[in-house]
Image: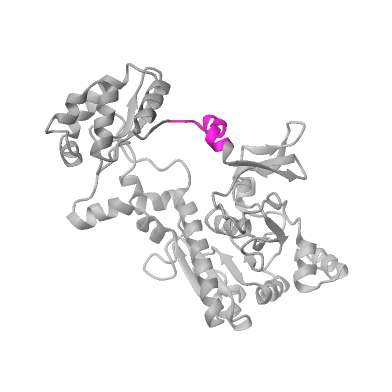
Amino acid sequence: MSGALSHIRVLDLSRVLAGPWAGQILADLGAEVVKVERPGVGDDTRHWGPPFLRDEAGENTAEAAYYLSANRNKQSLTLDFTQPEGQRIVRELAAKADVVLENFKVGGLAAYGLDYAALKAINPRLIYCSITGFGQTGPYARRAGYDFMIQGLGGLMSLTGRSEEETGAGPVKVGVALTDILTGLYSAVAVLAALNRRERSGLGQHIDMALLDVQVACLGNQALNYLTTGVAPKRLGNAHPNIVPYQDFPTADGDFILTVGNDGQFRKFCEVAGHVEWADDPRFASNRARVAHRAELIPLIRQATVFRTTAEWVAALERAGVPCGPINDLAQVFADPQVIARGLRVELPHPLAGSVPQVASPIRLSETPVEYRNAPPLLGEHSEQVLREWLGMATEEVAALRERGVL
């Protein structure tokens, strides 16, 4: 392998999304990632369907689409570490690993002698990343934390949904488990930072990642809108709190998004719309003024945009250099010529279905590009291979472990 992390071994004890997402990023970058799963059950998301992957005859396999989204380029090892022999094997694997990923409740792995302190004693170079809902400290530390709940508790849902003045007002979660995914991204960044530090110090470290911390950190400009004023932002639907016009507008055949980032772009929009007088109106001439007079400007724009189709608006505004775009469903996304040109859908060979679709990594490295080595593994697909290659176990030893229910 020639990936940037091809010299790194990762023991992934996590399940569901945040931890596996981090593991998949590291695996895409070349790391050897071993996913440790419960015998006979595996990662919870293996069963989170429908939809399931279909075989070449069109019949459902046992592989849920959810699981397939976050586990490519990994090897699956089934191991019952509630048994002493299973715990021993995890410790032996950790002694050979560079990174451990886990998302058990605070203290959950200490009962098995698999917490950071125990594994650090075996392997001082180990980087141990713990992902929980609320972190290792604080009054909520022992609570379970799930993406939807954290989107609410962490403020994201107070900003997402129609404004209180509109029909259908109320909090809305983001349509994907964004807090989990962002936590996976931050966790991967933290692991890379710890690996870099180890190059100089020779020592590993513990990484304490919390979904709530990530969610609050990712409130971005809205967090600073509150912290600098003391006024909590309200839901604005698809509108932007600091820029106008920056939202969706109706067209003759649907809707499109207009994202005017400066006063020059606003004037160009007004020219295309046939209303250059808006750009000269003191109420709308500057972004500061447009934000203050949002309630007057937006209805005027909406009355104008309904007379052309989405395609006509996008074509005309693109020619004028005004940022805009359609609102695509996922069928349109994966049929989009730019998405196709960038290769954002890939296919990998799969033993049950012939092939499995995947969404490509967005990371483009010129010298060590992402490699798509293997599809998300079947449960326990690589158990014997991992134990043989990492620990030098003989086939007879592996068979004996299977017989005793350890694998």
Which one is nearer the viewer's eye here, 361 or 73? 361
Please identify the residue farthest to the right as the structure is shown.
396
Is residue 379 in sight in this rendering? yes
Residue 2 x %, y %: 68, 61
Give the camera-side residue of 64 and 368.
368
Q: Position of residue 328 (x, y in %)?
A: 47, 30
The residue positioned 25% from the left and 20% from the top of the image is 274
Is residue 166 in sight in this rendering? no
Please tell me which residue lies in front, 110 or 333.
Answer: 333
**Looking at the rendering, in which quadrant would you find the N terminus?**
bottom right
The correct choice, above or below, for 259 with respect to 132 in the image is above
Relative to residue 148, is residue 247 depicted above or below? above
Left/right of residue 193 with respect to residue 403 in the rendered view? left
Q: Which residues are magenta?
A: 327-340
Give the percent coordinates (x, y) of residue 176. Answer: 48, 43
Question: In the drawing, does residue 324 fall left or right of residue 388?
Answer: left
Q: Is residue 172 magenta?
A: no
